[in-house]
Image: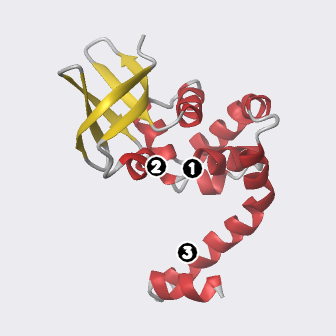
């Protein structure tokens, strides 16, 4: 029904944006990635998804069409609702998510709040073909898949060091060297 909202950013928090379009303020739930893209801007455009339930109508906004596409792909997975889909896209960029699915990296996906091991496997299984078709020719996703193994190992090493008692910033600096 709505494709995008373009207007003055009236209000913005880590999970909500209100866009003033012609004197009407539209409240949209947003991911952390979208928040980083629009925070501090006076005007913005958010691509919209309207979720209609029996007792509720909610708007979700995305800084770009790619993030919106991945949101709708996530919603096509049995058991994934809009809040979980938004949580996944808050944890990782769309390219990272696509790389995880294409590599069948359910361990990375299950680190998202609200996603357990079975759901992470289901997401990988149900979206692998859809994402490979959607990402054909997308160099951002191809690069993310190629570099994903290195990043996944780095994330695992960081988690291990933090578990052992090192400060996160200190461990990250050591891994970057």
Residue that carries the numbered disc 3 in the rendered image: 159
SS assignment at label 2? helix
Mark 1 or mark 2, earlier in chain = 2
In the rendered structure, are the residues bearing label 1 and label 2 in contact, judged by CB atoms less than 8 Å apart?
Answer: yes
* Relative to 25, residue 132 above or below: below
Query: Residue 155, position in %: x, y?
Result: 61, 70
* Numbered label attached to residue 93: 1
Horizontal relation, residue 137 to residue 169: left or right: right
* Numbered label attached to residue 135: none
Query: Residue 8, position in %: x, y?
Result: 27, 34
Which residue shows up at 38% across the image and 46% down it? 38
Taking the view exactly as shown, the residue that stands out farthest to the left is 23
Which residue shows up at 57% across the image and 40% down it? 119
Residue that carries the numbered disc 2 in the rendered image: 33
Mark 3 or mark 2, earlier in chain = 2
Closer to the observer: label 3 or label 2? Answer: 2
Residue 159: which quarter of the image?
A: bottom right
């Amino acid at each position: 029904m709505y494709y995008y909202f373009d207007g003055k950013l009236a209000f913005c928090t880590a999970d909500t944006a209100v866009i003033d379009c012609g004197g009407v303020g539209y409240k949209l739930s947003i991911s952390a990635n979208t928040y980083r893209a629009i925070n501090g801007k006076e005007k913005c455009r958010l691509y919209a998804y309207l979720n209609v339930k029996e007792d509720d109508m909610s708007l979700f906004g995305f800084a770009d069409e790619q993030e919106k596409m991945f949101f709708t792909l996530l919603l096509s997975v049995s058991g994934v609702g809009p809040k979980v889909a938004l949580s996944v896209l808050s944890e990782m960029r769309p390219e990272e998510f696509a790389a995880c699915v294409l590599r069948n990296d359910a361990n990375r996906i299950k680190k998202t709040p609200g996603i357990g091991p079975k759901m992470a496997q289901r997401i990988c299984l149900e979206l692998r073909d859809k994402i490979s078709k959607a990402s054909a020719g997308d160099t951002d996703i191809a690069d993310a898949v190629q570099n994903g193994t290195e990043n996944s190992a780095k994330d695992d090493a960081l988690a291990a060091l933090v578990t052992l008692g090192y400060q996160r910033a200190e461990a990250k600096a050591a891994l970057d060297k």
